[in-house]
Amino acid sequence: MASLTVRQLDEALKARLRLRAARHGRSMEDEIRGILRNAAEQDEPAPPPAAAKRGGAREGSRRASPAPDRTPAEDAAAAHKHILLVIGGGIAAYKSLDLIRRLRERDMAVRVVMTDAAQRFITPLSVGALAGEHPHVDLFDAKSEFDVGHIRLARDPDLVVIAPATADLMAKMACGLADDLASAVLLATDKKILLAPAMNPKMWANKATQRNLAQLVRDGVALVGPNAGEMAESGEVGVGRMAEPLDIARAAATLLSQSSDALKGLRVIVTSGPTHEPIDPVRYIANRSSGKQGHAIAEAAAAAGAVVTLISGPVTVADPPGVRVVKVERARDMLRAAEAALPADVAIFAAAVADWRSATNSREKIKKSGKEAPALALVENPDILATIARRKSGRPQLVIGFAAETEHVVENAKAKLARKGCDWILANDVSPETGIMGGDSNTIHLVTRSGVEHWPPQSKGGVAAALIERIAAAIKGRQ
Ligand code: CTP
């Protein structure tokens, strides 16, 4: 694509864009990106105004990620919080300068640690000018250790953001190495960590990096990006671009609002995991759902103050803390448990329910007869989401489903939204090559009655946090 720089625009247009960007709290570049994105998506139907109002101020926008706008709740949660930004050594470090501005725009205080390699890409002087204080660069700097010290650097912040998180930094974190200031601080901190990886696509895809990533996600580290696209190296395309500064700032704000009272006093039902539909005492019909996404949502809802009932099919993930867990096997049991958990304000159906069950459930193990294989007759299971969404009385205010698709993801999700009568659908592509089914990250397209939002790829915990924040805003908008 031809490059377009703001300098090439005429002064009057620049002034209008500057005003518009300031109104939206974005940089000029992000504003222009948003305008181009909307223009490119013009073939999508415009949101009906009534529905746009119903879901709160941000619903109905058609943008490539939920980042550009900010909700008052999100801003309030982030204001005056302390961020420790660790800048790793990669070409994406230049974007971290913008990230500092984006964080400070939200009234967050930013303290910076730079690795040696980071200082090869951007200077401590620029970082210091934007952050309002000199960055910390040396584990053995006597003055810095006397003033702040790496232990205080690790303990003081409300959130640690690593951007760019290089393959090297991720490997050190996964192994618990602490041979420089950045890694020592990361080992010493007990605060939530948000990782914004950036590296060459081959380095990202490397088994070692993926192993380290899996370990970090298991350790509770949150993730934003990386995105797919062109790399700084000419001709390289793939997954590895650092998430945009606005997306990172928003993910940070969302994480900071997670242990909040955002859903205080609300009753939330979440279904999660697969169902097992018995054929005989030893065999069953199942699917590859791990329950990671549904469990993460239940955990995030509880952390936001909701009273949560999690109805879980057979999974190996641990029960989330602070949540009432009802364990079921079959779709029919899941429906019964969901109905028994009513009344509720919000119901989120993340389970991968088996669509069919065996028409017969043999009491004895079916034996090989030596002749032809037995025919498996199937009958359809009840649709739990549709049953709850279409209730005449006792329907939760907000009924949210997922759409597991392998093709025409957004179109199929829109059809599902209409067919099932729910309010929102979180659509995801579960084709084997995405690694979403059973994996630790997810890419969501949020389909509401008023539009579609394309969320950036992120950890399942990140998706849960973003969803809880959206729910809180929507419920507030309806009150
Ligand atoms: N769902 C449900 N009960 C069912 C089937 C699905 O509650 N018997 C819910 C899922 O929890 C999810 C949504 O419906 O929130 C969509 O599930 P999905 O598997 O994507 O779609 P299906 O309805 O099964 O349709 P299809 O298999 O044709 O895509």
Image (cartoon, rainbow, N blue to C red):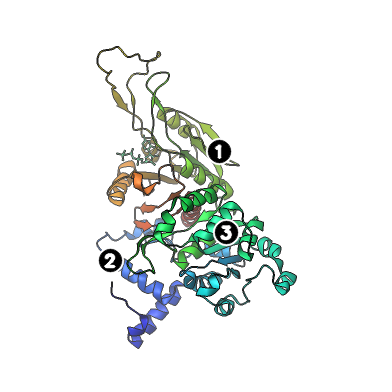
Q: Residues within 10 Å of mark 2 (few under 14, many from 20)?
A: few
Q: Secondary structure at mark 1?
A: loop
- As shown in the figure, which amino acid type bears the numbered disc 2? Ala
| Side (left or right) of 313 relative to 179 | left
| Side (left or right) of 257 relative to 423 | right
Compared to residue 408, the image places residue 135 above or below, namely below
Q: Secondary structure at mark 2?
A: helix
**To which residue does mark 2 refer?**
40
- As shown in the figure, which amino acid type bears the numbered disc 1? Ala
Q: Secondary structure at mark 3?
A: helix
Q: Nearer the viewer, mark 3 or mark 1?
A: 1
Q: Residues within 10 Å of mark 1 (few under 14, many from 20)?
A: few
* Percent x, y of residue 425: 37, 48
Q: Residue furthest bottom?
A: 11
Q: Residues within 10 Å of mark 3 (few under 14, many from 20)?
A: many
Which mark sits nearer the N-terminus, 1 or 2? 2
Label at residue 318: 1
**To which residue does mark 3 refer?**
256
Q: CA distance from mark 1 to mark 2?
A: 43 Å
